[in-house]
Image (cartoon, rainbow, N blue to C red):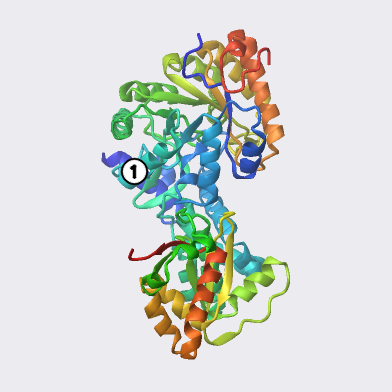
Amino acid sequence: MINEHFLGFGLGLRVPHFEEVIRNEPKVDWFEILSENFMVDGGKPRYYLEAVAERYPVVMHGVSMSLGSTTPLDRDYLKQLKQLMTAVKPRWISDHLCFTQAHGVNSHDLLPMPYTEQAIDHVASRIREVQDTMGQQMLLENVSSYLSYKDSEMSEWEFYNEICQRADCYMLLDINNIYVSARNHQFDPQHYIDAVDPKRVRQIHLAGHSDYGDYVIDTHDQAVCDPVWSLYKNAIQRFGAISTMIERDDNIPSLTELVAELEIARRIATEQLPAISRHPTRNHHAGA
Amino acid sequence: MPELETLQHEFIKFLTNQSQNFSQYISEQPPVDTDIRLGIYHNAYRMRLRETIDSDHPILGSYLGDELYDQLVLGYIEHYPSQVKSLRHFCANIPTYLQHQAPFSQHPILAELAQFERVLLSAFDAVDSKVVAITDLAAINPEQWPDIKLTFHPSTTIFTEHYNSVETWQALKSEQSPNPAVKHPLASYWLVWRNQQRLTEFYHQDPREQELWQHFNAGGDFAQGCEVLSQHFEPDQVPLQAVTLLKNWLSQGIISHIISKN
């Protein structure tokens, strides 16, 4: 039930916590870094990253690959990414099912794709190209969205499944993004989780959002809410032990507070799968 | 793939205020209006770029005050849609924008202040390199001295100011009111670098030190460096002055290599 890809329970590595992570080595099994934040030549960011990578398993998460763009893949970006991979030796790399660039302008936001056959072919072929360049399979994350295109021909989960199958890549399933998009497009988030191909899920993201009543925005500035925890529990039941982490990008609390929140994920997952407590992650705490 | 390309182009044109036709691609999904849905993306683009300017140019923001700063942010985002993958480089053209765009262009210290903040940022994440310790000077034989050349730490750079911009930066950094902008009669030089604790430092260089630094930075050797200084000092003082400056640079940790022929 628990495979070698299960890293346990991790956090996103953020600047305010750099020093404390190295000094105190908190009870976190692994860290996810935002690749672009470390694509610099040297100085503090790279010093701390290398120090963290010596102590913890690290995975690299990108926001700029723009897998959905119709312009050619940015070879300079891929080269920089590969250089960073050489330095960090991540367990895997991931990016998003979206586009972030068109006609020379970068949105710095994860813009949704139309759910069409044409887009499936296009994104799957670009992922294969990236995987060939990087020499390894990557993870693809579902994004939050706030609009639907008239051109869409299928559901998001059908689109996501099909791309991952054709590209032969893995899924980074963001449970909060499913919840946010479900609220914004009025579908059942459980239906999404039930439809995802369980063989392809390798990582789970959890995060908070801002609720405006009729719609929800994925702000990563709040604690994980109860409905998302509930979906997470169901996801673990369906997918088994999946490396799970919490993303927090704004209104960042103390590391202690985030570790406490991560313990909720650990508890929920362990209740569903007691074998998790016996799995040798970096911070193995039997019965935690 | 014309449909996908057109849709993505229209989305970007919408984000950058170049088109209002994008809503024709979007499904109506009551109860939330399409305008609200589109507005989420429109706001997010601006908010992220604004946060980047806030983060890169806090002192410039303090100097301008809220109203002018808002004008800068809005104007810059409209004039310079992001063409960079990393937000680290989004503000690279702010000094140029301030230099040429009224009302900012009427106050040349603004572009200089912004440039100083960018120089500090560049030093912060420049390439790492070891530095030579002052004790390493003892390893150089006397006959090697005329030929030695220096490589400075990759973070080291010279900031040239024509106004009291660094003094203004320092005042605002310590939450003091800055003096009025004043143009210097001659250009003034500041050496900026990242120290071994990975903190950015800077100090004012007098013109003679500046000339010698430029000489070594261009690949000149010690003997030629002494000739540079001979324009400013008596001949018997020149070697001592050169060695004093060299020791100062070593103690500051800005020299990565001392290269000798042997």
Say which residue appears at 36% left-offset and 39% top-offset.
A82
The answer to whether A157 is drawn above or below residue B114 in the figure is above
For mark 1, name the chain: A
Q: Nearer the viewer, residue B12 or A161?
A: A161
Determine whether, in the image, residue B146 is placed left or right of residue B155: left
The residue at which mark 1 appears reads as: A79
Left or right: A287 in relation to A71? right
Residue B205 on image: x %, y %: 54, 77
How far across and how far down the image is residue A284, in percent?
62, 18
Residue A146 visible at all:
no
**Residue A248, located in which quarter of the rendered image?**
top right
Answer above or below: position of B139 versus A173.
below
Most distant residue in the front direction? B142
Q: Is residue A238 visible?
A: yes
Residue A76 rendering spot, x and y as whole percentages: 33, 47
Residue at 45 percent of width and 54 percent of height: B127
Seen in the picture, residue A90 relative to B168 is either above or below; the reply is above
Q: Residues within 10 Å of mark 1 (few under 14, many from 20)?
A: few
- Nearer to the camera, A133 or B225: B225
- Extreme residue toward the right, this view: B176
Q: In terms of depth relative to the viewer, which is nearer, A277 or A189?
A: A277
Seen from the viewer's position, the closer of residues A223 and B31 is A223
Number of marks in picture: 1
Residue B259: x %, y % from top left: 38, 64
Secondary structure of the residue carrying tag 1 is helix
- Quadrant location of the C terminus of chain B? bottom left
Q: Amino acid at mark 1?
A: Lys
Quadrant placement of the N terminus of chain B = top left
